[in-house]
């Protein structure tokens, strides 16, 4: 068992899944990397796994980032790969463009990334770079094909506009009493995606991420 199947088998008990693979002929990858495989949390299973970790329980800052480094560095060592993270690098690694280059992740109508399995709850904990080509099957259809696009109108303060994301408007809303729902249960736009609803996410996980975003 090599390549994609091996990574999937090792990632599954960590509640991570391979969200896509970017190839050098379609993406600007780091030197020596021919294929970059993106690792994403796998729905409610991820929160249940993460909250049993030492990093979550030790009371130190950035528990999820520290957990990600520990487990994904171990995957890299086991597979002879290089680990990359969407945090801690200056300048940051271009995960958004890498994701689009996979053909398995798409730009939603609001600009945020959407995945057939995770919907708008998609996020990345890291990626593994390999010095050889590893193919990842493409989805049958783009996830937003035929969708009624509820994400476009879901934001209560219309913070997602044609010119980009009005982050100050979002933070201002979260500071008000009416923003408590988003703060405790997650972004209304992400939750509105039909695929997000199928994927599911624990409210505690959404609150964890929103606290990190809004601190």
Image (cartoon, helix red, strand yellow):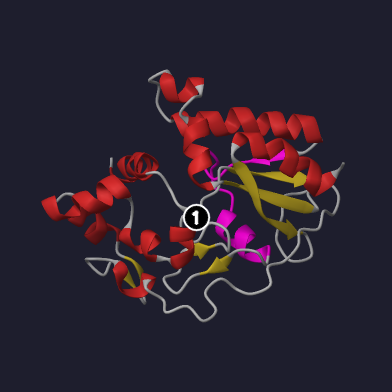
* Quadrant including the N terminus: top right
Q: Is disc 1 surrounded by few (<14), some (14 to 19) or many (20+) residues within 10 Å?
A: some
Asked whether, in this view, residue 121 is left or right of residue 25, the answer is left
Q: Position of residue 133 (x, y in %)?
A: 84, 54
Asked whether, in this view, residue 181 is left or right of residue 56, the answer is left
The answer to which of 40 and 73 lies nearer the viewer is 40
Residue at image mark 1: 199
Asked whether, in this view, residue 77 is left or right of residue 203, the answer is right
In the image, farthest residue toward the left = 177
Examine the image and state in which quarter residue 154 appears: bottom left
The answer to which of 50 and 55 lies nearer the viewer is 50
Examine the image and state in which quarter residue 22 appears: bottom right
Residue at the spot x=30%, y=49% of the render? 185
In the image, farthest residue toward the front = 198
Residue at the spot x=30%, y=40% of the render? 211
| Stretch of the chain drawn in magenta | 82-102
Position above or below: 41 against 161: above
The answer to which of 193 and 86 lies nearer the viewer is 193
Q: Is residue 120 visible?
A: no
Residue at the spot x=83%, y=46% of the render? 3
Q: Position of residue 6 (x, y in %)?
A: 80, 41
For numbered disc 1, what is the local secondary structure?
helix
Residue 89 painted magenta: yes
Q: Position of residue 19 (x, y in %)?
A: 63, 54
Q: Position of residue 5 (x, y in %)?
A: 79, 46
Q: Is residue 55 visible?
A: yes
Asked whether, in this view, residue 14 is left or right of residue 212, the answer is right
Residue at the spot x=44%, y=66% of the render? 194
Residue 105 painted magenta: no
Examine the image and state in which quarter residue 196 appears: bottom left
Position above or below: 33 against 63: below
Position above or below: 26 against 35: below
């Amino acid at each position: 068992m090599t390549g994609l199947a091996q990574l999937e088998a090792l990632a599954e008990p960590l509640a991570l899944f391979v969200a896509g693979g970017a190839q050098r002929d379609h993406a600007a990858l780091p030197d020596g990397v021919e294929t970059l495989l993106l690792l994403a949390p796998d729905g409610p299973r991820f929160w249940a796994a993460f909250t049993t970790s030492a990093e979550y329980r030790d009371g130190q800052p950035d528990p999820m980032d520290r957990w990600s480094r520990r487990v994904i560095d171990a995957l890299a060592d086991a597979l002879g790969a290089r680990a990359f993270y969407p945090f801690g690098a200056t300048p940051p690694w271009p995960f958004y463009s890498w994701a689009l280059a996979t053909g398995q992740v798409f730009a939603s109508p609001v600009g945020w990334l959407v995945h057939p399995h995770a919907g708008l709850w998609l996020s990345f904990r890291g990626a593994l770079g390999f010095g050889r080509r590893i193919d990842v099957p493409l989805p049958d259809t783009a996830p937003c094909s035929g969708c009624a696009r509820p994400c476009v109108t879901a934001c209560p303060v219309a913070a997602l506009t044609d010119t980009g994301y009005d982050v100050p408007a979002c933070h201002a809303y979260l500071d008000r009493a009416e923003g408590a729902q988003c703060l405790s249960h997650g972004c209304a736009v992400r939750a509105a995606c039909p695929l997000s609803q199928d994927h599911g996410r624990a409210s505690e996980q959404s609150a964890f991420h929103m606290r990190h975003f809004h601190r």
